[in-house]
Amino acid sequence: MLTVHEALEKIKQLARNFGEETVPLEEAYGRVISEDVFSDRDYPPFNRATMDGIAINVEDFNSKNIKEYRAIQDVFAGSSFSDKIPEGQCVKIMTGAPVPDGTNAVVRIEDVEQKNNKLGINSEFIKPDQNIAKRGEDLKKGALVLMSSTLISPAEISSLAVLGKSQVKVFKQPTVAIISTGNEVKPIDVHLSSFQIRDSNSYTIQAFFKKWGIQVSFKRLVKDDKESLLVTLKKALEHDIVITSGGVSMGDADFLPEIFDRLGVRKVFHKVQVKPGKPIWVGETDSSVVFGLPGNPVSVQVACKVFIEPFLRKSFGLNDVLAIKLPFISIRNKRTKFDEFFPCRVETKERSGLKAIQYNGSGDITATLGSDGIALHPAAQDSLEEGTLIEFFPW
């Protein structure tokens, strides 16, 4: 049976490129750039005033001891001033406006006072380039701004807009099929008998993909019937990613490993030394990657975070997300000899750290409510004492 680390390495080897497409900038949030993006010009493209004030020649003030100036024009953002500015004169300038040639400092308006028809400066010394953003100090034309395989957040949207990228080349999203299995599992909107449960797993998995902006195009609920499973899974395998829940353990009705084999899905591994989620089954075809998840709700949530998210990140060329190490402010004893993931929340009031959320096993439908993520109880540690630094993975 594989360790979590060994399973993750095999899963990441299955990563694949789903293709590329071009989308409008308005639709690029949450997508992953598939090309390097370069600066189209210098930024700022001119010497820019960073304060409201007056633009002067520093030599007039420092060397020639000129302390009062006559303003000959107002310069606003979006306008310019190209005339020569004579000695002892200045222009009033607004934040964002281009600094005229012949001036090399902006004195902020707070340091200027009206004296009759002139403007006096209440400063002892003015530095060259004071309150000026120099042309090209942020970016030079042709500079690399964003690398391929960058996840687009609001910061990237802002930069792309500044660079004039109304259309953005991104990696295509995979097509996804989700199948929940089990005779006892029913749609959420039907009347239940006392021995039946509602299908929550398909909604959990769908929500996980929605966080990545991936729309699920195929979702089915199938009984523990070999022929029904065969027909449904054959159709599901037309998608890039297939996620099933239930039917992969050792019970008499756990048919999925057999069905996967009949459909030509090559098994990569079955079972991992992890709790919850030990029975996970992973395989592939030439065109699909298959994750057979256990049926318990917490197992599904943990598997999405621990196993499927790294697969997606690798497929998009993103780096792994490193765990955050935080102090544990509970006490926890080991239940198995495996790596164990458990829900916890971040406390910041009386004591800062991670507090375990008590729950009744992987079938507990409220186990992760109020949690901020999952923490790892390593296989090698029988117990976690208060103050122990542990790895935390935010949802």
Image (cartoon, helix red, strand yellow):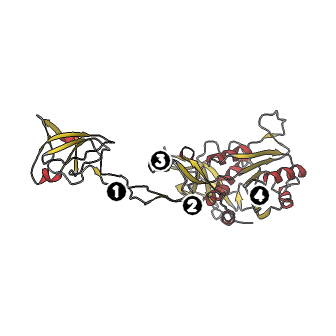
Determine the CA span between mark 4 and mark 3.
47 Å
The disc placed on residue 137 is: 1
User: Label 3 sits on what residue type?
Assistant: Ala
Q: Please identify the quarter of the rendering in which residue 255 is found.
A: bottom right
User: Label 2 sits on what residue type?
Assistant: Asn
Q: Earlier in the sequence, mark 1 or mark 2?
A: 1
The disc placed on residue 24 is: none
User: Label 4 sits on what residue type?
Assistant: Pro
Q: Earlier in the sequence, mark 2 or mark 3?
A: 3
The reply to whether callout 2 and callout 3 are in contact (CB within 8 Å) is: no
The front one of 95 and 111 is: 95
User: How many residues crowd mark 4 within 10 Å: few (<14), some (14–19), many (20+)?
Assistant: many
Determine the CA span between mark 1 and mark 4.
56 Å
User: Label 1 sits on what residue type?
Assistant: Glu
Q: Earlier in the sequence, mark 4 or mark 3?
A: 3
Q: Please identify the quarter of the rendering in which residue 285 is found.
A: bottom right
Q: Is residue 260 above or below residue 66?
A: below
Q: Residue furthest front?
A: 83
Residue at the image point whose x is 78% and y is 48% from the top: 179
The disc placed on residue 279 is: 4
